Image (cartoon, grey):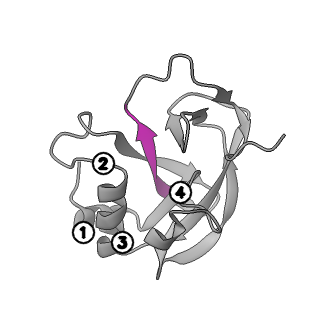
């Protein structure tokens, strides 16, 4: 996988679906990033893994995302938060892959761990609203 600087040259967009969304506890990691817009994608399914969600590259009926334009410094910080490991992407908590959004291709962090027994969110967003 490319380093953050090369990754940003490939695509400068990041799609977020959990605690990084506006108004949630980790959004400060996106300070300085430009909010591009909201979208719904069907190429990932969310799992409620407790204090945050994890996405798997599985079809869904549409999960809600927010898309941000980031620079290499911001992407590196997000990689650290998500425990994404550039040289061994399957060994951290999250990997990242490019998914299509209404605003163009964007990085999406995908959960590497087992989700057996975790509630599935195949439509809508996180946090789940009753």
The percent coordinates of residue 19 (x first, y second) are: 56, 55
User: Which of the two labelled residues, at mark 3 and mark 2, occupies the earlier sequence position?
Assistant: 3
Distance Cα–Cα, label 2 vs label 4: 16 Å
Relative vertical location of residue 10 with respect to residue 93 in this rendering, above or below: below
Mark 1 or mark 3, which is nearer to you?
3
What residue is disc 4 on? 15
Residue 54: image location, x then y, percent: 51, 38
The answer to whether mark 2 and mark 4 are in CB contact below 8 A is no
Name the side, left or right, on which 85 lies relative to 29.
Answer: left
Please state the horizontal and vertical placement of residue 111, each as a whole percent of the image. 43, 36
Return the mark for residue 74: 3
- Magenta-drawn segment: 105-112
Q: Local crowd at mark 2 within 10 Å, few (<14), some, or many (≥20)?
A: some
Helix, strand or loop for disc 1 = helix
Label ID, residue 83: 2
Q: Position of residue 18 (x, y in %)?
A: 58, 51
The mark lying in front, picked from 2 and 1, is 2
Structural crowding at the residue carrying mark 3, measured as other residues with C-alpha within 10 Å and reported as few (<14), some (14–19) or many (≥20): some
The span from disc 2 to disc 1 (Cα, nearest Å) is: 17 Å
Q: Is mark 4 in CB contact (under 8 Å) with mark 3?
A: no
Check contact, mark 1 vs mark 3: CB within 8 A: no
Q: Dot 2: what SS? A: loop
User: Viewer-nearest of labels 3 and 2?
Assistant: 2
Residue 5: which disc?
Answer: 1
Which is nearer the N-term, disc 2 or disc 1?
A: 1
Q: Residue furthest top?
A: 116
Crowding at label 4, few (<14), some or many (≥20) Cα neighbours within 10 Å?
many
Are the residues flagged by discs 3 and 2 in contact, CB closer than 8 Å? no
């Amino acid at each position: 996988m490319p380093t953050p600087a090369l990754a940003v040259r490939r695509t400068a967009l990041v799609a977020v679906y959990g605690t990084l969304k506006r108004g949630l506890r980790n959004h400060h990691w996106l300070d300085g990033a430009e909010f591009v817009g909201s979208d719904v994608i069907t190429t990932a399914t969310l799992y409620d893994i407790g204090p945050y969600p994890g996405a798997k590259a599985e079809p869904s009926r549409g999960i809600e995302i927010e898309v941000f334009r980031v620079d290499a410094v911001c992407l590196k910080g997000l990689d650290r938060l998500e425990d994404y490991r550039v040289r061994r992407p399957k060994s951290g908590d999250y990997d990242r892959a490019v998914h299509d959004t209404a605003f163009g291709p964007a990085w999406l962090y995908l959960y590497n761990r087992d989700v057996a027994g975790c509630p599935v969110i195949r439509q809508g967003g996180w946090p789940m609203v009753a």
